[in-house]
Image: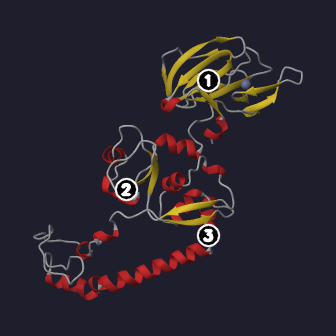
Amino acid sequence: MQQIKTFFLNCGYFCQKRAVVRLAVVFCLCGAFAAHFFLPFAQPETVSAAKTQGPGTAQTGVGGGGYPEKTALEGQQETDLSLEAGVLEPESFSKPQMLLYNSYAIQKNDMIGDLAINFGLNEDTLISINNIKNTRLIQIGQVLRIPNQDGIFYTVKNNDTLETIAQKYKSDATAIQLANELFSDTAHSGTVLFIPGGRLDWTERQEINGDLFIWPVAGYITSPYGYRRWPFGGNARQFHSGLDIGSPTGTPVRAAMSGRVSSVGWDDVLGNFAVISHHSGYRTMYGHMSTVRVKSGAYVGTGERIGDVGSTGLSTGPHLHFTVYKNGITVNPRTLMK
Ligand SMILES: [Zn+2]
């Protein structure tokens, strides 16, 4: 309920913005335009004519006055006439177009999802076009580019052609060519193209929304990711490669995402540890466990118990040390967990 209320508050706030007023004017004009051309088909007499003439003679078509036409519904005794009163959208309304932008400065309480709804775009579009790495880290005043169509950016790789890219993203080679004002149908490696209608893949979405992983253990962070004072005394600084999550001994440790257990073992620092390999180049490591409950090579589902919290190895008390690697380099797990 609170979320719905916030959403409407945001909408109200947002709608006061000039850009939107301008957009609203454009929409009104569009409405007038559509009404001018298409209202004759939506007039009650058309519908009533269809009613009196019966199925098969309803007015259909695009512009220029309808004409009697046989429909698939002909011969059916009981027909929902309202289905026949529709008019096809002119093809020109959905034909490929050049990519154009407006801009919008982020206001207090704006959220990418709400902005996308307000601009009639999907979230992937705003995320990709504005190179947003984490939707929770957008800033007031940050200026977003608002494109005139849905789609995402894509960096061309070796051996890509417009056709293969179009296929991958269920787009259309001609649409890609037009959106990017390409004079030929070849794309050079390294070029960034706008892919009309393209969507981000699941992993990209979860990374950006910060919910790729679940919390591997119920607890609180006793030591965050990054530089910290060496916890065993002295003034030395140390890079802490993961999160320490404090939790009582024996608390279940769960796989932060599904994957394959790639190693299980003992380390003088990490104590009993397990490593899970996931898709998209991710690996997670769980250290200091009192017991490891999985074997190397096993497949585990998200949330499956892989061990128990402990204080084995170099540890000051019961906690889980949790590291996330992306393509072999540690990343801050906090940006990938809700
Ligand atoms: Zn640690």
Q: Amino acid at mark 3?
A: Phe
The numbered disc on residue 285 is: 1
**Label 2 secondary element:** loop
Q: Secondary structure at mark 3?
A: helix
Q: Which residue is mark 2?
A: 182
* 66 lies above or below 122: below
**Of the pair 237 and 302, the residue shown nearer to us:** 237
> What's the residue at 49%, 55% (across, down)?
125
Do the numbered discs 2 and 1 sit on residues whose CB atoms are within 8 Å? no
Disc 3 designates what residue?
A: 14
Residue farthest toward the front in the current orientation of the protein: 183
In terms of image quadrants, where is residue 18? bottom right
Question: What residue is at 32 percent from the left and 65 percent from the top?
Answer: 95
State the residue at coordinates (63%, 17%).
Answer: 273
Residue 272, quarter of the rendered image? top right
Residue 118 in the image, given as x and y percentages of width and height? 53, 66
Residue extending farthest bottom: 45
Front residue of this view, candidates 91 and 31: 91
Q: Quadrant of ligand 1?
A: top right
Distance Cα–Cα, label 1 vs label 3:
43 Å
Give the left or right position of residue 170, taking residue 190 as reference.
left
N-terminal label among 2 and 1: 2
